[in-house]
């Protein structure tokens, strides 16, 4: 697998045209369904994971897949137990999400039951890669990966934020002061997004990441941290947040501290959550990267394609998120009002290339 450097290759790569369909949904309906299990690492109340699992369930219906989801509620021990239970049921395939470094243990358990696994959403951390190099048998069940290019997303968010700060004249003495609201470093998703910001800031030379936090994707925690930091660093003019829940907490904090988000402090997030889109429309949130909630659905489409083509070798796919700001919001809402993907044709996720740009779907 080559996901560690894939963002550099695919930043300007074409996504590839939509493949001619191997089978139609009606023919898939006549075949024995593939049994697929996935332990969702998030909380049932997390809007991102609600969006992701709804898309997966719709894709499963399209592709003739019998999908079983378990909820880990952001509890590492619970995720591992659910992974063991799912593997013991011996489904045809398991989708494994690497949050809290749970992927390799679950893959090892799946391998003991001869269940092939696909790494979805989040890739291996450097620590995981080292373990895998020392004990390759742990990942012997892995037949492919379908990951999100979080580095590109984090870079795009940072670039848009920095450009807007300059355009609105919020830089002071030629310098830009930012806060970075990150997420657990043990999650590759969070690390890659934050790396995109840090690398761009270093390249720019006039951007200072004044402080950064590693919070557990929590709106309340972001509110508390950003409130304290805005009091300590009133010169901050931009807040980069690894997800929308934390971005919304940052908006709440800015308002509570007498700041005017969208006017004297600009904030970006990631997820395309409904409230975030409303805040973008209102002007309080600058932008949200997103579309990555389709990664699970893209994984099911890629698995269906690979299985139908003979299930030989391995496959590796990347999903490239897209940035929505106020000017692009109308286009998105025209196609997907209220965030509903019910009318979306999930066959559009069957692509010939190894990259899919969300931008092509809206």
Image (cartoon, rainbow, N blue to C red):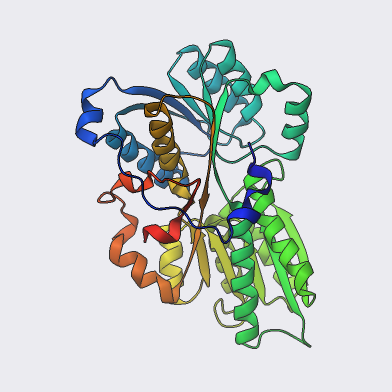
In which quarter of the view is residue 223 placed? bottom right
Residue 127 at x, y = what percent? 76, 35
> Can see residue 256?
no
- Decide: is 235 above or below 29: below
Q: What residue is at 49 percent from the left and 55 percent from the top?
A: 271
In which quarter of the view is residue 156 placed? bottom right
Residue 17 located left or right of residue 232: left
Number of on-image labels:
0
Residue 241 located left or right of residue 236: left
- Decide: is 254 above or below 297: below
- Decide: is 302 above or below 202: above
Q: What residue is at 71 percent from the left and 56 percent from the top?
A: 195
Q: Nearer the viewer, residue 229 or 94?
A: 94
> Can see residue 180?
yes
Residue 65 at x, y = what percent? 33, 28
Which quarter of the rendering shows the N terminus? top right
Q: What residue is at 43 percent from the left and 37 percent from the top?
A: 302
Residue 151 at x, y = what percent? 64, 55
Q: What residue is at 60 percent from the left and 75 percent from the top?
A: 266
Residue 198 at x, y = what percent? 74, 62
Which quarter of the rendering shows the C terminus? bottom left
């Amino acid at each position: 697998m080559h996901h560690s450097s894939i963002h550099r290759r695919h930043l300007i790569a074409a996504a590839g045209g939509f493949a001619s369909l191997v089978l139609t949904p009606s023919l898939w309906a006549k075949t024995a369904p593939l049994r697929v299990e996935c332990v969702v690492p998030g909380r049932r109340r997390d809007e991102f994971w609600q969006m992701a699992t709804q898309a997966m369930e719709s894709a499963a219906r399209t592709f003739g897949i019998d999908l079983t989801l378990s909820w880990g509620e952001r509890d590492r021990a619970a995720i591992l137990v659910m992974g063991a239970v799912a593997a013991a049921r011996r489904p045809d395939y398991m989708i494994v999400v690497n949050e809290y470094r749970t992927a390799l243990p679950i893959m090892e358990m799946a391998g003991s039951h001869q269940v092939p696994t696909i790494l979805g959403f989040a890739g291996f951390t450097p620590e995981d890669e080292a373990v895998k190099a020392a004990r390759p048998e742990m990942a012997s069940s892995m037949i492919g990966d379908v990951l999100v290019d979080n580095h590109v997303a984090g870079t795009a968010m940072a670039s848009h934020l920095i450009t807007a700060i300059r355009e609105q004249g919020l830089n002071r003495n030629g310098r830009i002061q930012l806060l970075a609201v990150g997420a657990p470093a043990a999650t590759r998703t969070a690390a890659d997004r934050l790396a995109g910001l840090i690398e761009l800031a270093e390249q720019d030379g006039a951007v200072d990441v004044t402080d950064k936090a590693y919070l557990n994707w929590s709106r309340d925690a972001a509110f508390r941290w950003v409130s304290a930091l805005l009091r300590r660093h009133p010169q901050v003019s931009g807040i980069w947040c690894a997800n929308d829940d934390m971005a919304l907490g940052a908006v709440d904090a800015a308002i509570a501290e007498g700041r005017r988000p969208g006017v004297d402090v600009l904030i970006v997030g990631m997820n395309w959550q409904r409230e975030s889109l409303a805040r973008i429309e209102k002007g309080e949130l600058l932008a949200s990267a997103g579309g990555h909630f389709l990664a699970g659905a893209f994984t099911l489409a890629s698995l269906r394609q690979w299985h139908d083509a003979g299930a030989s070798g391995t496959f590796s796919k990347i999903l490239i998120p897209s940035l929505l700001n106020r000017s692009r919001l109308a286009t998105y809402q025209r196609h997907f009002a209220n965030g509903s993907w019910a009318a979306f044709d999930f066959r559009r996720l069957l692509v010939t290339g190894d990259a899919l740009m969300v931008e092509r779907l809206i």
